[in-house]
Amino acid sequence: MVYYPIAHMVWGQEGLLAALGSVDFAGGNVVHISSGVSALVLCLALGRRSGFANVNYRVHNIPLVAIGATVLLFGWFGFNTGSALAADGLAVHAFATTALAAASAELGWMLMDVIFDRKPTLVGACTGLVVGLVAITPGCGYVPLGAAMPIGLVGSVICYFTCSRMKARFGCDDALDAFGCHGIGGVWGGIATGIFASKAVNPNLSWDGLIYGDVRLLGVQLASTVLVAVVGTLACILIVRALCGGAIRVSEREEREGLNLTQHGERAYPSFMGLDD
């Protein structure tokens, strides 16, 4: 209900945003902005976890975070380069811009960690890596190689402050920073595509980006799909409520006992490991 309308608007032959000249090479708008906005809507609809303001939530398993980010990076190269729909020079270009943006964003997040917390962290590096991938996705087949680095670096800084400062200020319980990384990172990536895109890289563009003196592409990139994501997500919430007797979250007792046990009847960490939930 969220993905299909937006995918048609951006990639369909008669899609609204496609007709305006908006571009999205591999899904920055279609996937990341829409999912980030949907996550924010659901976050606000569900409300905070019990005891949210009084509990210190910690990273569950840092080695698994690193492994997951590595697997994700591997797959990301696949769909960014695969969006060229051929094993050609454009696919190679998308591969290179993806690598440069991811590396720049990873270093950018580590730098923010050092500046504000005095230590770089592996979780921060992995988060920055993902932010760079998100930011470059809409423009990986449209922007020059030199633009990939500032796209990743600036996106990392923006998302760092969104996750570390803005979320705390507004009190949203966005546990995995889906909006802070995917939503905001996707928005920046779409805007950056309107700034740096070049017909010399991809002649399928209607116009060059702002840096080349043409403002039209940036204008259409600012055309938002946020409304579609909000409406579609609210519709999904209404359907779930209708099917589940009006409830979209578990009771406080079930939440306190743990969802592994109350929803699935199993413990993630049996007592013999000394890690009872």
Image: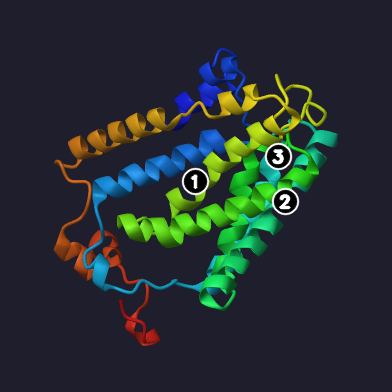
Few, some or many residues within 10 Å of mark 2 (<14, 14–19, 20+): many
Q: CA distance from mark 2 to mark 3?
A: 11 Å
Image coords of residue 65 (percent x, y): 54, 66
Q: Tell me the mark number nearer the camera, choosing from 2 and 3.
A: 2
Look at label 1 and name its amino acid.
Answer: Ile
The mark that comes first in sequence, 1 or 3, is 3
Residue at (56, 78) in percent of width and height? 118
Kindly check if marks 1 and 3 are in contact, taking CB atoms under 8 A apart as contact: no
Residue labelled with disc 2? 149
Q: Is residue 25 visible?
A: no
Q: Tell me the mark number nearer the camera, choosing from 1 and 3.
A: 1
Kindly check if marks 2 and 3 are in contact, taking CB atoms under 8 A apart as contact: no
Residue farthest toward the top in the current orientation of the protein: 14
Against 39, residue 84 (above or below) is above
**Mark on residue 93?**
none
Image coords of residue 187 (percent x, y): 53, 40
Q: Secondary structure at mark 2?
A: helix
Look at label 3 and name its amino acid.
Answer: Cys
Q: CA distance from mark 2 to mark 1?
A: 17 Å
Residue farthest toward the right in the current orientation of the protein: 89
* Relative depth, front residue between 86 and 231: 231
Residue labelled with disc 1? 184
Look at label 2 and name its amino acid.
Answer: Met
Residue at (58, 55) in percent of width and height? 156
Residue labelled with disc 3? 140
Image coords of residue 73 (percent x, y): 65, 55
